[in-house]
Amino acid sequence: MNVKKLEQLYEGKAKKVFATDNPEYYIVDYKDDATAFNGLKKGTITGKGVINNKMSNIMFALLEKHGVKTHFVEQLSDRETLVKAVKIVPLEIIVRNVAAGSFSKRYGVEEGRELKNPTLEFSLKNDELNDPLINDYHILALGIVNEKELAEIKTLAFKVNDVMREFFAGLGVKLIDFKIEAGKLPDGTIVLADEISPDTCRFWDAKTNEKLDKDRFRRDLGGVEEAYQEIFSRINAK
Ligand code: TMP
């Protein structure tokens, strides 16, 4: 599609969003910047923007094939993608298959314990408040989405989990947990938005449990770029 990149609308920690000459579309531009702990830790992961852009698009295309509606339209360059203009629902939608990260800390459960069933939690997307956990009643009380939309978001989240879990199992990778975001099209349709990448998922090698995601950066484990490369090359080898 032929669209012109216009002014920057927004700059996040890992991406910039630009307007285009068509109000129905935005262009996202992925950066190599990496942050953790709500921006307290800052760094660069060389080549991350390219990998996260391409990987997200592969994941969105796969999910579309399985009937999940996404904002993805077309990759424009190594770092840029054309997406449908959506209003982001200010929730971090987190699905977990295995205990790790904040879940392990909060509930005193060792990392790596398989959960009896995939589970879902929401955080309010608000950096000033440090993205606090939020429950269904709070979401409805604040009018963030209505009951029907909340049900749609939950169905979407578990569907994404089913498709991704199977896909990564085929690559010898365990999908531990992930965060997604939903957006609303002008007609009110809820679609999957943002990105799906080693920034937003935990991936462990199925045999060795080696971490192949941003936890290597968050926890100073070294081999950060290599982990992103490893996940991306497994996806491409498929
Ligand atoms: P958590 O265990 O730290 O809550 O993280 C759960 C998942 O969400 C994990 O796959 C990493 C991802 N995540 C983000 O994408 N952005 C964030 O700001 C945080 C804290 C986690």
Image (cartoon, rainbow, N blue to C red):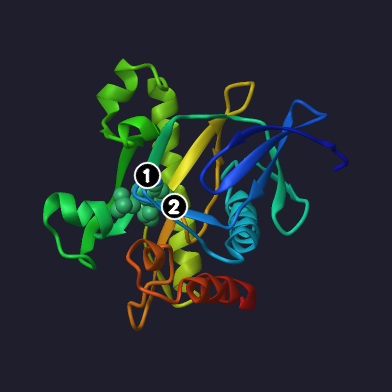
Helix, strand or loop at disc 1?
loop
- From this viewpoint, which residue is outermost toward the right? 2
Q: Amino acid at mark 1?
A: Asn
Name the spot of residue 68 as percent of width and height, x first. 56, 45
Q: Is residue 43 visible?
A: yes
At x 42%, y 62%, the residue is 214
Q: As displayed, is residue 213 above or below residue 157? A: below
Position of residue 98 in the picture relative to residue 28 (left or right): left
Kindly state the secondary structure of the residue where label 2 is placed: strand
| Mark linked to residue 38 | 1
- Residue closest to the eye, 134 or 146: 134
Q: Mark 1 and mark 2 in contact (Cβ < 8 Å)?
A: yes
The residue lying furthest to the bottom in this view is: 207
Spatial separation of the CA atoms under disc 2 and disc 1: 7 Å
Q: Is residue 207 above or below residue 155?
A: below
Q: At which x and y percent is residue 109? A: 14, 59
Q: What is the number of the mark on residue 67?
A: none
- Residue 158 appears anywhere in the view: no
Q: Is residue 228 left or right of residue 137?
A: right
Q: Is residue 90 above or below residue 12?
A: above
Q: Say which residue appears at 38% left-offset and 22% top-offset.
A: 147
The local crowd at label 1, few if under 14, some if 14 to 19, many if 20 or more residues have their Cα within 10 Å, is some
Find residue 35 and name its label: 2
* Image side of residue 98 versus residue 173, left or right: left
The amino acid type found where label 2 is placed reads Thr
Find residue 136 and report its image quarter: top left
Residue 127 place in picture, x, y as percent: 38, 35
The answer to which quarter of the image holds residue 47 is bottom right
- Residue ID at (69%, 55%): 79
